[in-house]
């Protein structure tokens, strides 16, 4: 039986506890939060789970095998490092750390101690993203042209990170998983509309080692919620709308039949291909359930998680560079080697 | 009776002829196109309209009062200048010219000869944009935060201009009309996926003399058509979806009730304002009908059109600078003075 | 060259003239309407077409081969009969006649004189309905369970017929074309909300010679426009939304995997089949263009149109019986033999 | 502290326990289900709640004040009667009973013993329905013309009741709450597509003591989920789409400006009124939370619940009569007096 300790019982905490509690051969032993009223919620719901306000008690607890860190980002590194040093396996909410330097240190510490280090890139475990990855692996889409994503809504301004770290992290993680290309440079434009607060609107552009462009619009101050990505390609194109519960992934058999060469508009028009649309059935299993299982399996079998520290580091590298670009007149910055 | 001559009978030409033909106190006398098969269409539909392949015959025709130019952009300047010099009033399709230098020359020539010079910024004459302008004029929205627009679809690659000149021109013209702020700088990221062709995907960011950001995504290679703009603001926010025929303009009474100040997520959440949505009835009159009337009225009364040469110049200035940015590593470029 | 005469230049007339004018090997010679202002529109648009207010002049015109009748329904029979007796081929707008008696007489007269008699059941010539028919012909859907249609909007109250004759006629015609079953009985519920006017809301139920039910909701007083049909079946189900321009026909691989037999809800749930959705590309050719061609071809080759008088009669039979049911306490009435 | 016992821990049970557990001044003491695996779920989630398989132990438990019945409909009457006779207050899932006779007996027993008898008509406690009722109370809509509802999806065939009892019950309850008119007659058409099973598709028509018609389409075998109601009226019309989370209630300022009187189609068209659409913000509080509070308050204060036995009886009366109509050739049946 693997025993988990969860640090941080905020917005995401209850989902983590519920899923890690029910993972096969695993349970949650202890939850830590500084806020007494949050611990009260744990007690009401899970009378058998211990609660503490001091994370040291959790990290040093001899029966706990793995520590789940769901605090604000600024605490990720210190808690994860302390847990690794205490010999625990570690699962960290996205984004993994505030800097690539921190991410590298955690990776090294985990390697040294043979502990599992996993990052919660939730989307990688959804049926929708798995289906898109399958389409790419089966070469259904042809040459990839672009990835364009809009991830906006009203709400949940954060204070320690800008909107890139909160929302764009999802798209960066998705691209890392589905695209077989290496990002080489990034630029970002953004603005804060609330004095002394991090940017609440931002536009990221990512360049790759191929003729591909990626772009992400993230925004905490939009009147409507949009979760919409387009994968442009030569054979088929994919639209992924996470809010469309009936058909989140749509595959369009549309595109250029061949490059236009002449100036007659009517003729050019004929060279487009307008075919069927197809919405594959998407497995609706809650991703966190699969994540809890996967982390448990990795601990048991001493295997590498799909979203390990390296994946987390690559993602942090892009977020960090994007933020730097935003503070350097939106210059295109080359991504450092990992 | 004002008599029009139309040069260029391509995609948009039939709409122009139909509307200028029916404008009160006006008619279309002649249509010019180099392509015989296009002129055949004119003859079939409008037996009373003269057709020519040589634009000189049209421009020099003594009975024609005003010339409508609906050719590829690269011909706009020469044709418009010739028409002005021949003493005609001139109506030019968007974008007005290929360069600001050309735009300035046309403005000067029109001033010197007291001719009306009008640009076809169609959206300015739609019920939707007029309603949004009204909301802004009545200070219904509060402080403006951002303008974000997505204008994408599959189709109609152009060869003499990139996607910015073809599609972003609409949003630049809309912003020029509705926003009471001065754009000061622009940057653009873009890519061409067809060898030797102009960029077919681009992302523009426009900065203003206030804490406002504008962003436009234009794309000729998208599997779905999107025409979606958001105007973020402090009191109310507007979503304009040109494809939603029932409710193209939606006004959301949503936003921050006051800037968040503390770190407790739950408390912050409470400070958002989630109010009603309102979709005002939008006048559905075909904008080109109003445009034909407006141009006729301006000729008759020697008044300035709402979308005159200056407006056209301001728009070309942004498109030109955006294209330059795209070719200079997406640097933010200051907009020259008009 | 087949020469058409069109009687009635109301809402639909301009579409008819435009399409029959452009049918290969055919033209429109004359248009008749009692309203001078409508004829003025014809003159402005088609200077070569003759216009008359007296339909006798059209029907008796020696050069006219075929008469197109687009008047209110109450005039269909007299005009069509006169035209047939004058030796013309006849094309009638839907619904064909006010009564089955009239429809039968027209069929007989057309047979006797070897004239083509065609009814404008527009939907039969749309890409969407042709695709659905193909799916049924290829046995893609399995056993048919039901056809459910909603056809509502605000507008265009008619005075000589109730909403069933105006709107349900489309669905009755569609079912006649796609379903390989014989309707045997019909019932209708309805109400008029405007004094002394025909019913503006109605619900039709149609029973077949199989375990199938069809239902149609038609309504002239709805705040939104809906054109939505569902074809329930055992293998795949079809949703046809005529207002969804991107994907009007959607095919769902969903249903019962096998009949539920036990009482455990959870288990039953597992017996449903939730598969892919597929939206075939739909040919967007204007149906009236195909109709004009088809009618011309039938005249030239003396062949039966797809929507001939018999089809028109079957449709009128259902509308007539439904109206009778509505006036007889909504009783289920057996459909008389055709 | 009010103590609840819950009988039936199926699909809806967990929601009931969670909400009644957290109602102020109340708790859940015991849960009863015949299925051991369901009780296991209770134990895992709520270690402090007692579980039993024998409902007698629950009903006779001296500390339990009120019994919540969430079993199949066929058990409602016996369990509720036993609970009332044991002196408990009773809360029953919809529909209240299988027959009006049973409903009347429960009402009488509750009256005699001064116990609270409440039915779970969930929608009455939603923000959307409360808003629609407010609009009607404030006479915002004018004369009511019709209520039309579509409530269809794939799934959850029931064995002891037909689809009317499962789904139409919601619309009947909503109408009972919002419409100030008395239903006088009902007819229903329906069909079963699974041998030996109750009807899985049905169409209900309800007539009132005014010129109003109501119609409900319910269906367990539809490829898509629809929850869509229209309230037609003279001043404003309401569309309620329960699946549109952003704007479930839309109010349209549309209709007839005055009854059409002439035959000119164009003129009639002008007499329609096309105004704004307005989507009021809808309170999103979980209705079951309000229900648990309301039932608790009624017990404490010995007051009548909004959805008491009489409301439940009126609803059962319509469902029962509709089912009878379906089995009597869909005749319109007068509703017996309550």
Image: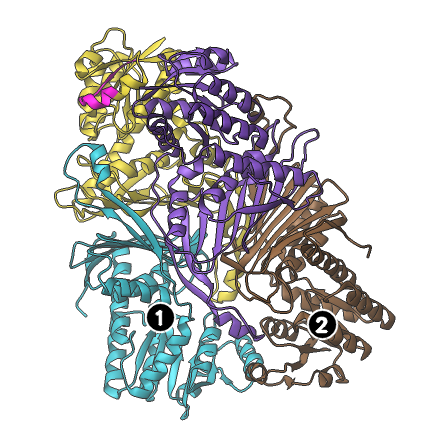
Chain colours: A cyan, B yellow, C purple, D brown
Q: Position of residue D309 (x, y in %)?
A: 77, 64
Q: The residue tagged with tag 1: helix, strand or loop?
A: helix
Q: Nearer the viewer, residue D148 or B182?
A: D148
Image: magenta residue range: B29-40
Quadrant in the picture for residue A196: bottom left
Residue A300 is situated, as x and y percent measured from the top left of the image, at: 33, 88
Q: Chain of mark 2?
A: D
Is disc 1 on the same chain as disc 2?
A: no
Q: Chain of mark 1?
A: A
Which label is found at residue A125?
1
User: Is residue B179 something that shows in the picture?
Assistant: yes
Direction right: furthest residue:
D112
Tell which of C337 and D34 is nearer to you.
C337
Which residue is rendered at x = 28% and y = 19% of the image? B42
Separation of residues labelled 2 and 1 (CA atoms): 43 Å
Residue C224 is tagged as: none
Q: Residues within 10 Å of mark 2 (few under 14, many from 20)?
A: many
Nearer-the-camera pick, A36 or C142 = C142
Helix, strand or loop under label 2: helix
Position of D122 with respect to C208 (left or right) is right
Question: x and y percent of residue C154 in the render?
Answer: 56, 35
- Left or right: B154 with respect to C151? left
Queried whether the magenta region covers residue A265, the answer comes back as no
Relative to A212, D338 lies left or right: right
The one nearer the camera, A277 or D230, is A277
Residue carrying label 2: D76
**Residue B36 magenta-drawn?**
yes
In this rendering, the answer to whether D274 lies above or below D175 is above
Q: Quadrant of the N terminus of chain D?
A: bottom right
């Amino acid at each position: 039986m693997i025993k988990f300790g969860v640090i941080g019982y905020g917005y995401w905490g209850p989902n983590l506890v519920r899923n890690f509690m029910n993972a096969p051969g695993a349970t949650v032993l202890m939850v830590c939060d500084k806020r007494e009223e949050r611990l009260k919620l744990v007690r009401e719901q899970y009378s058998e789970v211990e609660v503490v306000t001091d994370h040291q008690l959790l990290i040093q607890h001899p029966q706990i095998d793995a520590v789940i860190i769901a605090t604000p980002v600024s605490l990720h590194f210190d808690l994860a490092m302390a847990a690794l040093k205490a010999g625990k396996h570690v699962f960290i909410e996205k984004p993994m750390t505030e800097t690539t330097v921190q991410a590298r240190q955690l990776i090294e510490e985990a390697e040294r101690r043979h502990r599992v280090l996993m990052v919660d890139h939730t989307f990688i475990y959804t049926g929708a993203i798995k289906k898109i990855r399958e389409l790419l692996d089966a070469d259904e889409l042809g040459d990839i042209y672009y990835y364009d994503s809009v991830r906006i809504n009203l709400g949940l301004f954060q204070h320690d990170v800008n909107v890139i770290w909160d929302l764009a992290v999802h798209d960066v993680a998705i691209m890392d998983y589905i695209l077989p290309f290496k990002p080489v440079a990034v630029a970002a434009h953004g603005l804060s509309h609330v004095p002394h607060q991090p940017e609440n609107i931002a536009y990221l552009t990512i360049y790759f080692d191929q003729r591909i462009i990626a772009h992400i619009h993230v925004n905490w101050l939009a009147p409507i919620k949009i979760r919409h990505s387009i994968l442009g390609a030569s054979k088929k194109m994919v639209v992924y709308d996470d809010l469309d519960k009936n058909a989140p992934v749509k595959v369009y058999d549309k595109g250029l039949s061949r490059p236009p060469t002449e100036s007659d508009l009517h003729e050019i028009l004929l060279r487009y291909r307008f075919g069927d649309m197809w919405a594959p059935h998407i497995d609706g299993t809650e991703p966190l359930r699969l994540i809890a299982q996967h982390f448990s399996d990795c601990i048991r079998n001493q295997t590498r998680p799909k979203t390990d520290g390296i994946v987390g580091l690559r993602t942090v590298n892009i977020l960090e560079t994007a933020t730097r670009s935003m503070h350097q007149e939106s210059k295109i910055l080359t991504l450092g080697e990992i």
